[in-house]
Image: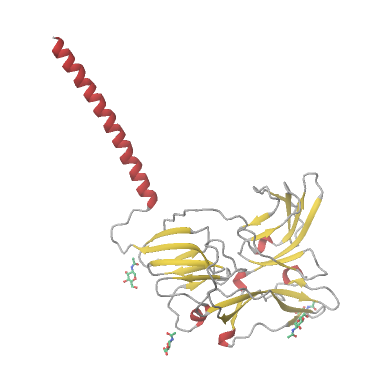
Amino acid sequence: MPSILLYLYLSLPGFWALDSLSCPSGSHSCLAFITPNPTTLSCPAKDSTWFFQPLFHSFPRKKLVIPEASGDLHLLHTSTERSGTYICQDEAGNTRAVYNVDFQDGAKLYLSHSELEQQPLKNQTVGNSSQWTLFTQWGPWQACDRCGIQGERKRVGLCYARRLEQPELPCGLADLSPQELQRGPELQIESCFVPCGPNGPESTVVLYGTYNLEDNSTVWLSCPFATIYRPVSWEAKDISPTWLQQLSPNNSGPILDLPSGGSRLRVTTSGTYRCYVSRKLVGRFDAAWTHNTPVAHSRSELIRIYSVIEAVMVMAVLLLILLSFIQMCRTKLSSNV
Ligand SMILES: *[C@@H]1O[C@H](CO)[C@@H](O)[C@H](O)[C@H]1NC(C)=O
Ligand SMILES: *[C@@H]1O[C@H](CO)[C@@H](O)[C@H](O)[C@H]1NC(C)=O
Ligand SMILES: *[C@@H]1O[C@H](CO)[C@@H](O)[C@H](O)[C@H]1NC(C)=O
Ligand SMILES: *[C@@H]1O[C@H](CO)[C@@H](O)[C@H](O)[C@H]1NC(C)=O
């Protein structure tokens, strides 16, 4: 098991304001996202109460417990089972927002890289009695993930369904059978180059991780604050993993995780890995393989050892004081005799 230590330096307000993609006008209360990326649903009222009703189930709606006082619902890890209706109520019990949410399966994400002349998915027609057209609704291109060198940028596409003269719906909210709904969301990548501008504000949050790993094991490093909806890049001593490298037939380097849009990186070699979100450093990870050499003490173990040493020292000092006191009494007694 890797031992993980995280040090939180400073928290940056607003960093958790996650991007979302909303439905087109006409079906305003529906939203679609990609699992397992974190998501925020906003509520116009503070001290709100949230309720959740799963899709196509008659289960009674469930009250959700949220610790934040802002009223918004932060879902840090999402899954397709969390698709359904989310309702927020204010303190007086009035409904303030209703969202029909489709969490599309990140494991079904279709990746295409323009550099390799890979085409995104084509429109598709399914169903025989009531025909649906399934298509991808694209979000905007994100910013280039690196500057001064060739970088990559991505855009997220969500699966939408349209039937004659009806508003389009996220695929999961359309009345499709599992056979009809084989299609998932998409991710498109293209190469980009932007010059480095004057240095922007330094990132105020950097999370550090230390991983001590056993021989031949692999570890997934998770870039803090990264999601598929943001530009993320990784850098090690002499490699900077890209989607283009990963898609080449003989890639042997680290692996970018597809469902999270590269927010996680699988590594198998020792080194220091850094990750950037919107070209700002947010994480640094030291991964070391032990190779059966004596296991290096992790920081927490050292802290534990230091506390033991401290306790021993304090006891030794107390003992010394006691001994000298006894000695003093003895000397006094012997001099009195
Ligand atoms: C795919 O379907 C969408 C929605 O009906 C439409 O806007 C788009 O033009 C179609 N694309 C192609 C290539 O036919
Ligand atoms: C649609 O067609 C398939 C065969 O192509 C058939 O098995 C199925 O029963 C049909 N469904 C409806 C609703 O007609
Ligand atoms: C690690 O892999 C090498 C060859 O790839 C093998 O010889 C060695 O036994 C493996 N070590 C462990 C602990 O599995
Ligand atoms: C992949 O392997 C082929 C031959 O096996 C080689 O020509 C090519 O340069 C390699 N590509 C990379 C990126 O290593």
Image-quadrant location for residue 87: bottom right
- Residue 98 lies, with reference to residue 24, above or below; the image says above
Image-quadrant location for residue 219: bottom left
Task: Report the residue at 52% width, 53% height from top.
Answer: 10
The residue most toward the top is 337
Q: Position of residue 37 (x, y in %)?
A: 61, 64
Along the line of sight, which residue is nearer the eye, 279 or 294? 279
Along the line of sight, which residue is nearer the eye, 201 or 156? 201
Along the line of sight, which residue is nearer the eye, 283 or 86? 283
Question: Is residue 124 among the parts visible in the rendering?
Answer: yes
Q: Position of residue 132 (x, y in %)?
A: 78, 78
Task: Report the residue at 72% width, 57% height from top.
Answer: 42
In this rendering, the count of numbered labels is 0
Query: Colour scheme of this structure image?
Result: secondary structure
Task: Report the residue at 44% width, 59% height from top.
Answer: 209
The residue most toward the front is 198
User: Quarter holding the N terminus?
Assistant: bottom left
Along the line of sight, which residue is nearer the eye, 260 or 80? 260
User: Quarter holding the C terminus?
Assistant: top left
- The answer to whether residue 228 is left or right of residue 88 is left
Q: Position of residue 20 (x, y in %)?
A: 68, 65
- The answer to whether residue 161 is left or right of residue 327 is right
**Where is ligand 3, by quadrant?**
bottom left
Question: Is residue 218 among the parts visible in the rendering?
Answer: no
Q: Position of residue 118 (x, y in %)?
A: 60, 86
Image-quadrant location for residue 74: bottom right
